Structure formats: structure tokens, C-alpha cells
Image (spheres, helix red, strand yellow):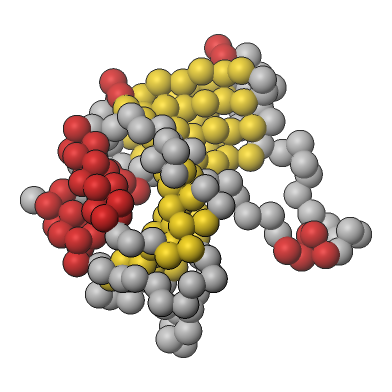
Amino acid sequence: MAVQSWSALLKASTKTALIHDGKRKIHYLFTDGKEMAEEYDLTTDELIVRKWRSKSTLKGQGPWEIEVGEPVPSTVACLESDVIKENCSNPVFMRKDTKTSFLWRVRNLPYPKEVYNISVEPDQRCCIIRTNNKKYYKKFNVPDLDRSQLPLDSSALNFTHANNTLIVSYKKPKEILTIEHELLREVKKLKGTNEGDVDCKTQ
């Protein structure tokens, strides 16, 4: 079963823990060379950041790709004030989960709730946000379900709108909750070093 194989991959990975700034930071190195980095809130145990990195074709390190958390602002745009950059009023799509749901926020969407249509497309293994005024369209997948090869369920999907932000939630299936619970228990066992310590403990 795919859920078990993903769980086994997580357990087989080399893990390094770091405690810093109220966060538990975990780095995973998988046998195929891929890396995953996660940050958890030390108080609530909620996942704040998850990002991935693969080796590039030249065997060097590729860039980090954010799966959960705030998108990283462009360094170039920060350095050059006169550079052409994305309008700050454009919609900003990001994922920020809770313990029981996958959660996506789209900021800078001023339209009322009745304008939005959010659907699950099981054949394409994705969710789609549409507006009936044709002002916004977004197709996105749920990597957690893909990794465990779990089906998408339209009854798990919900959305609300407030303060110019569309919030889409997808209730986590019990298989995902089990994996996350087991993983959190594992990472809490890791002896996290404080930043500045040289010998990071790995498992």
C-alpha cells in the first residue's frame, strides 16, 4: 500500500533536528538524494514550513521549492527598487495547514463568496478555484495525498471568504492524520541541537 511505502520512506530517511527561535526544524535526506525541510511550532506542534530540494542535472543542489508556508520574496526585487516586479495587489496563493485540514489562502481576492466555485477533479488529481466573473483561476494538487496515493474526496473540501482572502480547506483523511502523528512522535525523539552547536544529531 502506498501509504505504508511513504511512511517507510520517512522512517528510512536521515533526519537532523535543530531547535531555534521557538521552532523545531527537521531536515530529511532521502535515499534518492532528495531533501525535505520542515519547521514546527514548538508550542502548538503545528507545521509552519515544508520545502523540498532535488539534485540538479549537474549534480549540484537545486533551489528549494515551498510546499507549505509563506512564499519567499524575490531577492532581486528587494535589491532593485526600479526593477519590474509583480503588482502587490495581485492574488497571492499559499498553503498553511492546521492539524486537521490542509489549508490554502489566496490573498487579494476582493470578490464576494458567491463568485467562487471550488471543485475537486479526481481524474486530474487536483482542485480548481474558478470565479464566475473569470477574474481568477487556479489549479493545484494535494502532494500529501499524491505521495500516499489516496483518492481526492469532494466532501472533504470547503471554503470561506473574509478580509479579501479566500480560504480553502480540505479535511485530512485518517491515513494522513496517522502518518503525521507517527512522524511528529519520531521527530520529537530527535535530540535537537540549538543553533550554533556543531554536532547536529541525526537519526
Residue lying at 31% horizontally and 71% vertically, measured from the top left:
202
Q: Is residue 68 visible?
A: no
Number of marks present in the image shown? 0
Residue lying at 34% horizontally and 48% vertically, measured from the top left:
143
* Rendering coords of residue 167 (x, y %): 52, 26
* Rendering coords of residue 69 (x, y %): 52, 46
Q: Quadrant of residue 46?
A: top left
- The reply, left or right, for residue 28 in relation to residue 165 is left
Above or below, 158 against 73 in this view is above
- The reply, left or right, for residue 24 in relation to residue 13 is right
Q: Quadrant of residue 180?
A: top left
- The reply, left or right, for residue 190 in relation to residue 54 is left
Above or below, 3 against 55 in this view is above
* Rendering coords of residue 18 (x, y %): 44, 62
Q: Is residue 45 visible?
A: yes
Residue lying at 42% horizontally and 65% vertically, measured from the top left:
193
- The reply, left or right, for residue 101 in relation to residue 14 is right
Above or below, 116 against 88 in this view is above
Front-most of residues 199 and 156: 199
* Rendering coords of residue 122 (x, y %): 28, 36
Front-most of residues 155 and 188: 188
Which of the image's four quarters has the C terminus? bottom left
